[in-house]
Image (tube, rainbow, N blue to C red):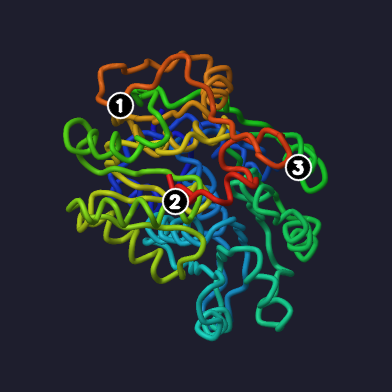
Amino acid sequence: MSFKDLQLNKPILRAIADAGYDDPTLVQERTIPLVLGKKDVITSAQTGTGKTAAFALPILQLLFDKQDAPKKGKKIKALIISPTRELAIQINENFKVYGKNTNLRSTVIYGGTSIEPQKDILNKGIDILIATPGRLLDLHKQDNLNLDYVETFVLDEADLMLDMGFIDDVKKIERLCPDSKQTLLFSATMPYKVEQLANTILKSPERVEVSPTSSAAINVSQVLYYVPKRNKIELCLHLLRNTIKGNILIFRRTKFGVDKLEQTLIKNGYKVETIHGDKTQNLRQDALKKFKNGYVNILIATDVAARGIDINELDAVVNFDMPNVPETYVHRIGRTGRAGQTGMSYSLCSADEKTYVKTIQQLINVQIPIEENHPYPLDPKAKPIVHKSKKTGSKHKKGRKSVASKKKKKRWY
């Protein structure tokens, strides 16, 4: 099937061709006709399958023929809600690429930056608004936007939206739009809370599930290294020197861990940038831009900061810390091996993370190959270190607060 078969108009088809796309992905092939048919849709598909174009292209098509003239004042006809600033910016960039041959206007609003320029853009009139929940509600309270004319409402990355605590904001925003609107929900996973939300805001929705949410990216080769926790940084450096090449995204569980690993890699001569929740929006965007443009080849990030970021030609993902939620592993390694390209995933697992590996392998139904030929092997019988309190005699796993652990210097790794 080609994009022409999806009944898209010539201006949009030219933009798609200019962007270098030949044929639609499976999620686009199945979702676009439903959206053009003005159906409510729930689409479940893993990262990297082309979900943004699956709603952006048909929205542009639906708005093209009946767009408001600029002189008469454009009204918001399509509203896309995104959980993170980075993803919202990326969605807006995609709308501009796909809609460059139309007169449709889109903009993005998000927190962490000045609200005044966003007010000015909204006052001039736009057709398509991409927003994070908090900033959108702030602008609505100040009477700077009107959602009475919204025809299509899109909730993107719904599972992450709920994980970040935005469920009440999402419901408020949905109620600000007309009852007659078309609603589209996109999610990498479909946990019970997402199903509950879908049941309250969608009307007789069509469902599209392109691939099981438990499946890891088929173009990604995975390898697992068992290593003592104290030797993780040494193994990471060893792999960067000898094995892992190209553009690399390293995941750490905490913001503190991200910063500490950055300091260590810089001391060892690597060009590194980081993104996490404590950084300002400008710093996060600058770090991402430097990575995408090749000024640095290593980006270290937490999961929330990196979710939904589209990075072309990413060669490898490193799980420095194993995720304790198995679906997170699928999201992480799905950053590479996109759009038909191949990628590598390297996971560093200490004794206390073995249970995480077990649940991950159960989810993806794959035994991750183990690489034993490295300088810092883990004793197969090794178990998480347990400290015994001298005063109480009670046992504490390493890392938990105890009399013994308070006396020791906390390890950052």
Give the label, 1 or 2, closer to the camera. Answer: 1
In which quadrant is the C terminus drawn? top left
Which of the two discs, 1 and 2, labels the residue nearer the N terminus? 2
Residue occupying the point 28% across, 44% down: 20
Nearer the observer, disc 1 or disc 3?
1
Q: Which mark is residue 250?
A: none
Q: Secondary structure at mark 1?
A: loop
Q: Position of residue 152 (x, y in %)?
A: 65, 55
Along the viewing direction, whichever of 240 and 36 lies nearer the viewer: 240
Amino acid on which disc 2 is placed = Gly
Dot 3 or dot 2, earlier in sequence: 3
Nearer to us in this view, 138 or 303: 303
- Residue placed most toward the observer, 230 or 84: 230
**Point 54% across, 39% down: residue:** 32
**Taking 412 as reference, is 242 above or below it?**
above
Q: Which residue has dot 3 on it?
A: 198
What residue does disc 1 label?
Answer: 376
For disc 2, the marked residue is 257
Horizontally, residue 179 falls left or right of residue 99, namely right
Res. 289 image quadrant:
bottom left
**Distance between the alpha carbons at the discs numbered 1 and 3:** 47 Å
Q: Amino acid at mark 1?
A: Tyr
Three-letter residue code for mark 3: Ala
Residue visible at 42% across and 17% down?
368
Secondary structure type for disc 3: helix
Q: Is residue 14 left or right of residue 61?
A: left
Q: Answer with left or right where residue 312 lies relative to residue 200.
A: left
Q: Position of residue 313 (x, y in %)?
A: 27, 41
Disc 3 and disc 2: Cα gap in Å? 36 Å
> Crowdedness of circle 2 by 10 Å Cα count: few (<14), some, many (20+)?
some
Up-down relation of residue 103 to residue 58 (above or below): below
Q: Are marks 1 and 2 in contact (CB under 8 Å)?
A: no
